[in-house]
Amino acid sequence: MILLTPHSLDKVTILPRRGNADKSSSRFYWPSNISCSIATMILEDHYFMKTLFQQSHQLLRSHRDLATQVLAGAGIPFAPGG
Amino acid sequence: MANLITTYFYPASPIISDNILFTSGVTSLNAMCALCLTDPKDGILLGQPIYGSFDGDLSVPSSCQLIYTPFQGDDPFSLNAVVRYEEAFLKARDEDGVSVRALLICNPHNPLGRCYPRETLVALLQFCQKYQIHIISDEVYALSVYDEDSSTDGFISVLSIEPASIGVDPALIHVLYGMSKDFAAAGLRLGCLISQNQRFLQAALSTR
């Protein structure tokens, strides 16, 4: 495999044994085609994403408000914001 | 995905498909980053506490070392935290002889659930530039944030900071994102590496 040196990535080191090891594991890193297809459908639905994130943010806010209310009532400090 | 990043991460430079590499989840990306950026025994700098599985994700496949930064009571999201990172970096380098190759942060943070302020991100980027190490920003929780809150700025991606304006090489900046958290779709096993560094993307591609 080609292994870039860490700093400026301007050198190339060939490590044959590491390369063989990586080849053996590379099959685990490929995304599946069906995953890519499903993700593409989701990502192209801008209305869905907008409403999903709005609902997610609102729910997270209400759950945080509940948690911080309980913590404050019990005198347990917590980081503001989030 | 480039459209999502453009819409919600407010990148300072345009993100196109050529800047994105897809893999089978962010776990795989962690391994690929470690394999590409470190030799065995090299270090990756992290804060403490942090997502516990980074140990297995990073050090097992690559034999790199994780250098944890204790914040000694300082707020891990403050500018003082950057001083602590530098102390941990220098200790690893000068006392333990470890070549630290990258800083890995979680933003929003896992497990602390907080976002980094812009000023801290700028300082972290400049710290990485100073020592010529990469910054890997795991932003897999980017859009799982609270509804409007005037007490913070919310999530700010490192991609939204113009590196040239603060004297930072954009080739050192890499972002990890995925579908598992914000879309509650962990079963898709889909993660992506976002970088302006084409050589790094090619190296990561060779391990995929």
Image (cartoon, coloured by chain):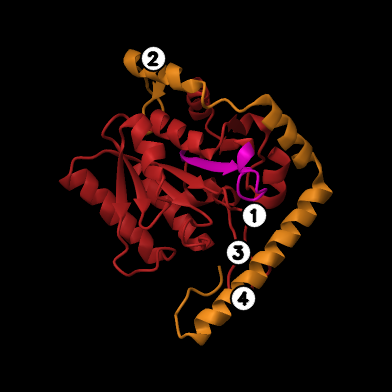
- Have a look at marks 1 and 2 and say if they share a chain: no
What is the CA distance from the residue labelled 3 to the residue labelled 1? 10 Å
Nearer the observer: mark 3 or 4; the answer is 4
State how far apart marks 2 and 4 are (Cα): 52 Å
Residue B208 is situated, as x and y percent measured from the top left of the image, at 52, 24
Tell me which amino acid carries mark 4: Asp
Q: Residues within 10 Å of mark 3 (few under 14, many from 20)?
A: many
Q: Which residue is mark 4?
A: A65
Mark 2 to mark 3 CA distance (whole Å) = 44 Å
Q: Residue B55 occupies which quadrant of the picture? A: top left
Secondary element type, mark 2:
helix
**x%, y% of residue B85?**
33, 55
For the residues carrying marks 4 and 1, which lies nearer the camera in this image? 4
Residue B33 quadrant: top left
Disc 2 and disc 3 on one polypeptide chain: no
Amino acid type at mark 1? Leu
